Structures are given as structure tokens and as C-alpha cells.
Image: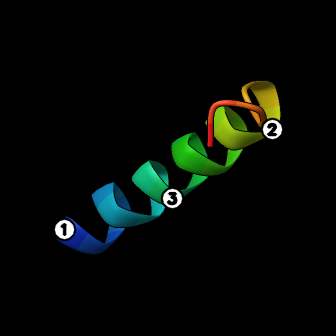
């Protein structure tokens, strides 16, 4: 289960960086 959560988190972070690339 932890692996699934970790993968979901990675996807969320990737999308976040794509939406807000200037923040980081």
C-alpha cells in the first residue's frame, strides 16, 4: 500500500511542478 501512495505522491508532485514551474 505504501508503494501505491508513494507513486501517487510522485505523480501529484510532477503535475504540481508542471502547473507551477516558476515556484521552484
Tell me if label 2 and label 1 are in contact, CB under 8 Å.
Answer: no
Give percent across and percent down for residue 3. 30, 73
Q: Is residue 9 above or below residue 16?
A: below
Quickly name the residue at label 3: 10
Quickly name the residue at label 1: 2
Distance between mark 3 and mark 1 Cα atoms? 12 Å
Please indicate, yes or no, whether residue 10 appears anywhere in the rendered image: yes
* Closer to viewer: mark 3 or mark 2: 2
Give percent across and percent down for residue 13. 54, 46
Q: Residue at x 46, y 51 (%)?
A: 8
Tag 2 secondary structure: helix
User: Extreme left residue here?
Assistant: 2
Distance between mark 2 and mark 1 Cα atoms? 24 Å
Left or right: 2, with 11 as reference point: left
Viewer-side residue, 2 vs 13:
13
User: Extreme top residue here?
Assistant: 19
Disc nearer the start of the sequence (3/1): 1
Q: Residues within 10 Å of mark 1 (few under 14, many from 20)?
A: few
* Closer to viewer: mark 3 or mark 1: 3
Q: Quadrant of the C terminus?
A: top right
Distance between mark 3 and mark 2 Cα atoms? 12 Å
Label disc, if present, on residue 17 of the rendered structure: none
Q: Quadrant of the N terminus?
A: bottom left
Tag 3 secondary structure: helix
Give percent across and percent down for residue 5. 30, 56
Left or right: 23, with 7 as reference point: right
Label disc, if present, on residue 18 of the rendered structure: 2
Q: Residue at x 77, y 37 (%)?
A: 21
Amino acid at each position: 500500500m505504501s508503494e501505491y501512495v508513494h507513486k501517487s505522491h510522485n505523480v501529484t508532485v510532477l503535475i504540481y511542478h508542471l502547473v507551477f514551474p516558476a515556484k521552484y
